[in-house]
Image (tube, rainbow, N blue to C red):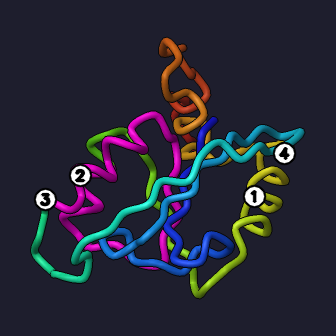
């Protein structure tokens, strides 16, 4: 699956989605990760309320399943989710390669439901009867 990272320095997730100068994209599997492409964005990215700056970013990451950010506004998050991309906020600047390592660990185990859904992006929907089970307590 493709994973996007909002970054200023191309090394860490350290950027607000709307203000990010770069979005690095990696192809991540349980066994490995490959750098795909870095998208650079210029202009006045800091202007709050400028929804037009989001369109080029969403266009570039349309085929990603997950987007890691330092921060993201509510309307931007809604637009990301509408593109069937799962936004994930990191606590502080975190190296991209560390995030990939943690993600791969989860992929090798039992991914949570949101991650299973992200993994299915772009593939025909398969019924997941496990999620439909009624919990009896």
Question: Within 10 Å of the Cα at label 4, are there few (<14), some (14-19), or many (20+) other Cα atoms?
Answer: few
Depth-wise, is mark 2 or mark 3 nearer the camera?
Answer: 3
Precedes in sequence: disc 4 or disc 1: 1
Depth-wise, is mark 4 or mark 2 nearer the camera?
Answer: 2
Between the C-alphas of marks 1 and 2, the distance is 24 Å
Q: Which residue is mark 3?
A: 52
Look at the picture and state if 52 lies above or below 69: above
Q: Secondary structure at mark 3?
A: helix
Q: Position of residue 70 (x, y in %)?
A: 48, 78
Q: Residue at x 39, y 77 (%)?
A: 16
Q: Are marks 1 and 2 in contact (CB under 8 Å)?
A: no
User: For the magenta stretch, what is the residue range?
Assistant: 52-80
Between the C-alphas of marks 4 and 1, the distance is 14 Å
Residue 79 marker: 2
Question: Within 10 Å of the Cα at label 2, are there few (<14), some (14-19), or many (20+) other Cα atoms?
Answer: some
Please tell me which residue lies in front, 116 or 12.
12
Look at the picture and state if 92 lies above or below 133: below
Between the C-alphas of marks 4 and 2, the distance is 30 Å
In the displayed structure image, the side of residue 89 where residue 98 appears, left or right: right
């Amino acid at each position: 699956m493709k994973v996007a990272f909002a970054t200023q320095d191309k090394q860490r997730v350290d950027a607000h989605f709307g203000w990010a100068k770069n979005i690095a994209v990696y192809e991540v599997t349980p066994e490995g990760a490959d750098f795909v492409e870095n998208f650079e964005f210029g202009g006045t990215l800091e202007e709050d309320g400028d929804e037009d700056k989001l369109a080029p970013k969403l266009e570039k990451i349309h085929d990603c399943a997950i987007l890691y950010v330092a921060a993201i506004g509510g309307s931007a998050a809604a637009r990301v989710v509408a593109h069937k991309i799962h936004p994930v906020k990191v606590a502080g600047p975190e190296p991209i390669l560390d995030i990939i390592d943690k993600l791969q660990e989860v992929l090798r185990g039992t991914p949570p439901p949101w991650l299973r859904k992200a993994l299915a992006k772009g593939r025909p929907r398969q019924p997941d009867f496990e999620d439909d089970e009624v919990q009896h307590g």
